[in-house]
Image: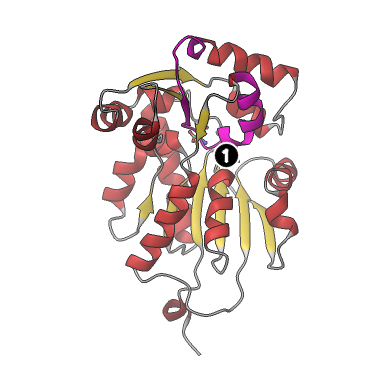
């Protein structure tokens, strides 16, 4: 019998300000079904997008400290806003822990565009960060990057309101500057937004492809586990834990709606919990 550490049965920690990171969680568990996961949503403070960077750093450091107290083996910051503000601080604070961050998928969108114009829909926090400017300078390669701020959209997803006239008219208003921009790709630069994909497609039409970095983050997670020799080595029990700093029953309902397919076709234990961090 292997010891716990030798079998690497500790969970992968996944963090977001709210439920948006579930769009990354579902890709991770599809690719790594044998692994346990611990998903932390800081719903007491969602949305992060309008907060000053120092505050986002403070909240993210507190969340990651909590995940580390739970002995997770690797951390995925499944939040573009928290990654933009805090990734460097996290990595310098905990150099021994593999920490994967998110960034808007400018690189693949710029490689695939035929019109030479791509859109990026993200939170103010992500778009204002220096990290985002560097990303554009490094990867846009002459392609025009049109940014739009998704103010209010995180709230719809947190409220499980993914379609309907209110969401649609909000998206129409937000995406209006892109109507004449000739874009053929829209980068979803916030992990909440893939849950609004159907409504976004309705607003933008079939000519615009949506780019979600979640599958690439799941591949990266698998690669990092292998590189650090942290993959779970036994077919032993695994579990999925979902933890919020906000309202537990609302969180549980939202998780159950957003990732219903994954939870229904699952036989491992699933736990929901509220914590103060
Ligand atoms: N899911 C977060 C992101 O990817 C949402 C940010 C927020 O809380 O405003 O940016």
The residue under the point 46% across, 64% down is 71
Q: Residue furthest front?
A: 114
Measured from the top left, where is residue 55 in percent x and y? 41, 31
Label 1: few (<14), some or many (≥20) within 10 Å? many
Q: Is residue 181 highlighted in magenta? A: yes
Measured from the top left, where is residue 169 in percent x and y? 67, 14
Element on which disc 1 rests: loop
Residue picked out by circle 1: 20
The residue under the point 24% across, 27% down is 137
Above or below 259: residue 106: above
| Segment colored magenta | 177-203
Above or below 27: residue 125: above
Q: Is residue 41 highlighted in magenta? A: no
Residue 176 is left or right of residue 247, and the answer is left
Measured from the top left, where is residue 99 in percent x and y? 37, 53
The verdict on label 1 being within 8 Å of ligand 1 is yes
Number of numbered discs overlaid on the protein picture: 1
Front residue of 11/208: it is 208
Front residue of 51/192: it is 192
The residue under the point 56% across, 69% down is 34
Above or below 26: residue 152: above
Q: Which color scheme did the rendering employ for the protein?
A: secondary structure
Measured from the top left, where is residue 246 in percent x and y? 64, 40
Residue 147 is left or right of residue 251, and the answer is left
Front residue of 199/67: it is 199
Residue 277 is left or right of residue 111, and the answer is right
The residue under the point 46% across, 79% down is 7
Above or below 261: residue 133: above
């Amino acid at each position: 019998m292997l010891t716990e550490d030798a079998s690497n049965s500790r969970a992968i920690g996944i963090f977001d300000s709210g439920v948006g990171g579930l769009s990354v969680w579902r890709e991770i568990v599809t690719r790594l079904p044998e692994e346990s996961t611990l998903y932390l949503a800081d719903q007491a403070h969602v949305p992060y997008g309008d907060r000053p960077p120092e505050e986002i750093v403070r909240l993210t450091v507190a969340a990651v400290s909590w995940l580390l107290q739970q002995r997770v083996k690797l951390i995925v910051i499944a939040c573009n806003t928290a990654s933009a503000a805090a990734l460097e601080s996290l990595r310098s604070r905990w150099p021994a822990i593999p920490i994967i961050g998110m960034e808007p998928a400018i690189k693949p969108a710029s490689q695939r565009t035929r019109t030479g114009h791509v859109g990026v829909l993200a939170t103010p926090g992500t778009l204002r960060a220096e990290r985002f400017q560097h990303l554009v300078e490094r990867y846009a390669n002459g392609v025009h990057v049109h940014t739009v701020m998704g103010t209010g959209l995180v709230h719809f997803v947190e409220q499980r309101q993914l379609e309907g006239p209110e969401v649609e008219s909000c998206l129409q208003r937000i995406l209006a500057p892109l109507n004449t921009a000739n874009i053929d790709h829209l980068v979803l630069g916030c992990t909440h937004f893939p849950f609004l994909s159907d409504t976004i497609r309705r607003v933008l039409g079939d000519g615009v492809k949506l780019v979600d970095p979640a599958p690439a983050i799941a591949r990266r997670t698998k690669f990092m586990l292998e590189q650090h020799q942290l993959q779970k080595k036994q077919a032993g029990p695994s579990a999925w834990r979902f933890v919020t700093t906000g309202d537990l029953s609302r969180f549980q309902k939202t998780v159950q709606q957003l990732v219903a397919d994954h939870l229904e076709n699952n036989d491992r234990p699933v736990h929901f919990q509220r914590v103060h961090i």
